[in-house]
Amino acid sequence: MPPPIRLKDHERDRRMIRSRVLFAGFALIFLTLLLVSRMYYLQVVQFEYHSTLAENNRIHVQSLPPTRGTIFDRNGVVLADNRASFSLTLTRERAGDWERVLDSIIEIFELDYDSRELFEKRIRQGRRPFEPVPVMFELTEEQIALVAVNQFRLPGVEVAASLVRYYPQKEHFAHSVGYVGRINERELKRIDPVNYSGTHHIGKTGIERFYEEQLHGQVGYEEVETNARGRVLRVLNRVDPVSGQDIYLTLDSQLQEAAELALAGRRGAIVALEPKTGEVLAMVSQPSFDPNPFVTGISFKAYGLLRDSLDQPLFNRVLRGLYPPGSTIKPMMAIAGLDAGMITPETRVYDPGFYKLPNNKHRYRNWNHYGDGWVELNLAMARSNDTYFYDLAHKLGVDRIHDYMTRFGFGQRVALDMFEETAGLMPSRDWKRSRYRQPWYPGETLILGIGQGYMQTTPLQLAQATALMATRGKWIRPHLARSVGGIQPIVDAEESDDIVLQDESHWQAVLKGMEDVLHGRRGTARKVGQAAQYRIAGKSGTAQVVAIKQGERYDSDKLAERHRDHALFIAFAPVHDPAIAVAVMVENGESGSGVAAPVAKEVLDAWLLDEDGFVKDEYQTEEQRPEIAAARIKAAQERLKAEQAELAEQAGVEDGL
C-alpha cells in the first residue's frame, strides 16, 4: 500500500521565511550601522591623522642646504670658494633595489670596484628619508648624457646642480685653510642633524674645521607636492637658507708665495707673525698637497701615495712638527739668567772649546772646537757660544729653566684658532720621573740650555717666542682669522701673563746680542745682515737629528741626508719698531746661519721692501729717510735714461728702415 501523501504546511513555511527575512534585515542594518560607525571613526574621529598621512604621501619637505662662507686672505684674495658642479645623486627610497642600481652605475660609467665600494659606503651613511645622496661629483657633459640615455635603468638616480667647495690656491694654503670632506659616522653624532640635512660636507682641518659653525650657515627648507613617482609638481612653501659667514684671514698670499719660493722646494716650515697683533702673516709647511680631491672624495690610490710618501706632504710641520730648538732658545735663556740674577751682561766665561761639570771628565762640546776664549753675554749671543750657555744652564738649574721657558710659550699650545696644534715638550724633573721613572741628571740640564735633549718645539712656538722678544714680553696669541662675518674676533680669549722682568733693561741687553748676530763683527749670520737694508735681530740654531759620540765630529758626508742636522733661524725686524717676526726650520739643512737665515731674510724683504726694493716708508728710521729718498730719485733718473735710450734706439732703427 503506497505511503500517505504529506500535505504542505504553508503556515510553518511562512513563519520560517519571515524569521529569515527579519534576521537578514537586522544583519543588514547592523552591518550598515557598523560600516557607518567605522566611516564616522575614520572620517571624523581620525580625520587629522589620515589627512596628515595623505598629505605626507603627496607633500614632502626638502632641505635647502646653505651656501658655505667664502675664505679670503687679508687683501681679499679668495682662498676657499664654492663653484657650480653637477652631481649624480641616488635616493634609496625611490631606487628600490639600490644595490642593483649601483651596479648599473658602475657598468654605465665603466668604473672600478673601489668606486663601487666608495659609493656603497656613502649610501649607507646615516641620512634622512628621501634625502638624495651624491655618489659622483663634477660630472662631464658626456657623463650627463649617459645618465639621460640610461635613465630607465637608474630609478631614483638624478643629475643635480650643486655648489662644491673649491680651493683656487690649491697647495699654497692647504695646511692653514684646511679642507672640507664628506661627513662621517663619528661627525654625524656630534652635529645638529636638522641643520646639516642636505649637507654632505664638513670642515676637516684648518680654518675650515675651527670655524665650521660660522662657515656652514643655517639650513632652509621647502614644502613640495610630488606625484606617485616622487617627481616634484610644485613648491607650496619655502624658507630660504642663511648663507655661512665670510672669513678674512690674516694671511698675505704674496708673502706666502715669497716664503715658499725662499724654501726652494726643501722640506721645512716658515711662520711669520705681526708681533703687535698676533696676526699670522704667512704659514708655510713644505711639501704640501692639493686639497681639492679631498672635497669630492679622493681615491684610495691617490690617498695612499700622499699618506705613504717619505716627505709627508699631509703633515703640518708648522703646528705638529716637533724639533729640538737648538740655539734659537739662547735669547730666552739669557733673559732667564739675567732676571734670575745668575748673570749680568758683563759676566764672563772662559771657553776652551768645551765645558765640563765639576768632578766630571765628560766634555760638552762647543760648536767652535777651538773655543772663543773669554766671552760675555753679547759675544756669547753673537757667536752662539755653547760653553757660555752650558754654564748658564748649570747655574739656573732645570727647575728655573722650565719655569722661564714655559713663560715664553714652550711646552704649551699658543694659538687661538688652530685645532691641529700640538703642545710640544718642555721637560722637567717631574716629567722625566713620570715618563722614564728616572731622576734628572745635571748633564741633561746643560744640553737643555742649548735647546737639545728632550725639549721639542713647533715652528709656531718659536715664532711666538720671537714675537715675545720683539714686544718685550707682551703676550698676544697668534691667530689666523682677521674678521668673521665682518666682526673682528677676540684675540685674547685665553689670556696669558705678560713676561715682566725685575729690570726692564735686560730686554735691551739681550736684543742687542740678537742684533749683533746679524750686524756684529763676529755674528754667525753677519753675511745676511750685511745685505739687509734694515736692522734685524735674530738667532741661528742647529738641531741634531742623530747623536754624535764623545770625541767624534759631525761629518755630513758620512750621514744619510735625512739624518743631517735641521737648520733653524728666528728673527724680527726692523729692530727699532718690530713689524714682523719670523721662524724658519729647514729639515736636514745643517746650517742655521748658512741655510735658514737667508730664507728668513727673503721673507723679511718681501714684507718690508716695496716693489722697487726700498724699505717701505712706514718701516724707515729717521736717519734712513733722506738716504732712501735720494736713492729713489737716483733710481728713477736711471730708469728714465734707460727708457730714453731705448726710445732713441727704436727711432734709429725705424729711420734706417
Image (cartoon, rainbow, N blue to C red):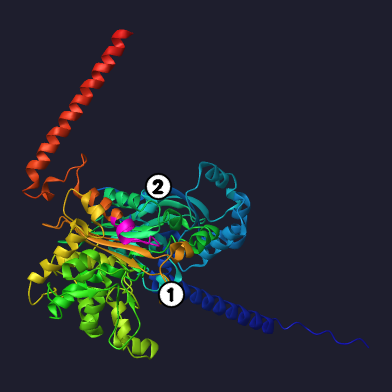
Quadrant assignment for the N terminus: bottom right
Q: Which residue is mark 1?
A: 41
Q: Is residue 278 left or right of residue 226?
A: left
Amino acid on which the number 1 mark rests in the picture:
Tyr
Q: Which residue is mark 2?
A: 84
Q: Secondary structure at mark 2?
A: strand
Q: In front here: 387 or 614?
A: 387
Q: Position of residue 588 (x, y in %)?
A: 40, 62
Q: Residue at x 21, y 42 (%)?
A: 613
Assess whether residue 352 is covered by the magenta stretch: no
Amino acid on which the number 2 mark rests in the picture:
Ala
- Labels 2 and 1: the sequence-earlier one: 1
Q: In front here: 557 or 135?
A: 557
Q: In the figure, 191 relative to 650: above or below?
A: below
Q: Secondary structure at mark 1?
A: helix
For label 1, the crowd category at 10 Å Cα-Cα, with few meaning under 14, some 14 to 19 and many 20 or more, is few
